[in-house]
Image (cartoon, helix red, strand yellow):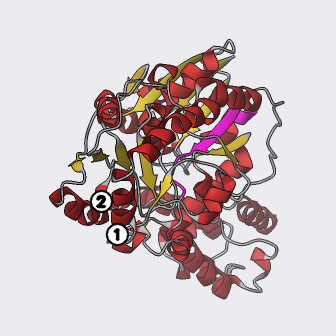
Amino acid sequence: MRVLFAPANTSGQGSAMGEAIQRYGYTTETWVFGKSPFGIDCDRRFETARLLADPNYRWDMFDQAVRNFDVFHFMAGRSLLDSAEPAMPVLWDLPLLRLLGKKVVMHFRGSDVRLPSVHLRREEDSYFRNLAVLPDEDAIMNRIAISRRHADSLLVSTPGLLDYVPDAEWVGHVVTDTTVGYPRASEPDVPHVVHIPSSRATKGSAQVELAVQPLVEAGAITYQSITGLTVKQTHDMLRQADIVVDSLTIGDHGLISVEAMAVGCIPIAHIADINRSRNPGVPVVEATGPTLQHVLAGLASDPKRRAALRPELVKWVQTHHSHDAIGSRLHDIYQRPVVFPELHRTDWPVSTSTRHVEGLERRLADNHLQGHPLFAGFGPPARTTPPALTERLTQRIATLESELANAGITVNESVLGGTIRQFRPSVRARLYQHPRLHLRLRQFIERRKK
């Protein structure tokens, strides 16, 4: 079976999952659209600008994927065509892939699915409180709804994401086997603490630095914070560190904690109670912004506790995040029977702005057309006509009205009663082109001709 991880290789997890399942006989590739941050590698890379501008390039990519893969493991709420097809709805290739007999897995990774309103209620120090612009919750929920309807399986990477996709399965981060169990020297008297945020805004970095500064000045710890490292540089830094501070503002630990545990580096993070209950026994040391200084001071002054923790960390990763652990989970998911999607579901979620415009037009149409015999049983089409088509549509209106006139009918005296005239051209054109309305007009013309 052939598996494609796309269109992102989030933190190198697509490649890592590919390595994990190859032992079961799968062949895998990781495709990425655009540049990968942090020096993350992939099997194939496609230019984002060209995907947007060149339909042949875009469809050639999709054709190659369909011909060469059986399982499509999508990352971060994206698919092959939704981000590269501006004229179509998001994730519109999911039902197409399903109808072609492909297995589709959607793997949510974090900010792609996290809802600010839910997170703010749960987390007192939620990072959303400090963001100037919050994510569009309607867009997030629409992606979840489409994925739920058209994907074979929904996955999340951390237990906290089950708050937003409760019917998903939690398949955690995976680390390469070569990074697990790095040997360490004896415990230092002054531990080295690091903070390696992928985003300072979402990890509570300001709180971290406030907490560590007094300990650094007192000589209790040494401290280093750095961003923008490659994957290899991050692993090297964790091998040299004794303690790593992960996020204080998410309520979940991230990949950095797993990578730290793999090499015996003690991770500290804030994990909400509900997420600890979903992941019982996880050996990540608990701390929040207000408690971090006290927690760090306790670890710094207790080398025996640190030494006792390190083997427990490595064992946890071997049990829950190794190639064996994650590979077996994915193998079970990929081997489930294919269930073809329901074909009668046509209500595709749209963006907030489009829905707002269509709602106003629908209300306008309802007010003008309610009770008119010509429109009994149906309303105007919902899709908005692009402005570029207005001229051609206006010509079509003129043609149809000319036929009415040739049949001895003036629009204002006909069954239309001038109603459609009250709409702007693009809306009038859609009403004229509605299949049932068009048929009724043609039948009316033929009857008058006789």
Question: Residue 126, percent across and down?
Answer: 44, 69
What's the residue at 44%, 65% (across, down)? Answer: 135
Is residue 99 a member of the stretch shown in magenta?
yes
Report whether 216 appears left or right of 364. left
Residue 162: numbered disc = none
Quadrant where the image shows the C terminus: bottom right
x then y, percent, for residue 290: 37, 72
Please give the range of residues in magenta.
97-113
Disc 2 marks which amino acid?
Answer: Ser
Question: Where, by quadrant of the figure, is residue 336 drawn?
Answer: top right
Q: Label 2, on which residue?
A: 205
Instruction: Find the distance from the CA under tag 1 to the CA under tag 2.
Output: 14 Å
Query: For the residue carrying disc 2, how many other residues have a C-alpha within 10 Å: few (<14), some (14-19), or many (20+)?
Result: many
Q: Residue at x 82, y 46 (%)?
A: 342
- Coordinates of residue 66 in the picture (x, y in percent): 61, 23
Residue 405: say if magenta.
no
Q: Is residue 15 left or right of residue 161?
A: left
Q: Amino acid at mark 1?
A: Leu
Question: Which SS class for mark 1?
Answer: loop
Residue 173 appears in the rendering: yes
- 210 relative to 134 in the view: left or right: left
Among numbered discs 1 and 2, the one appearing first in the sequence: 1
Q: Quadrant of the N terminus?
A: top right
Residue depicted at x 44% and y 19%: 43
Residue bearing the label numbered 1: 131
Examine the image and state in which quarter residue 133 appears: bottom left
**Dot 1 surroundings within 10 Å: few (below 14), some, or many (20 or more)?**
few
Q: Secondary structure at mark 2?
A: helix
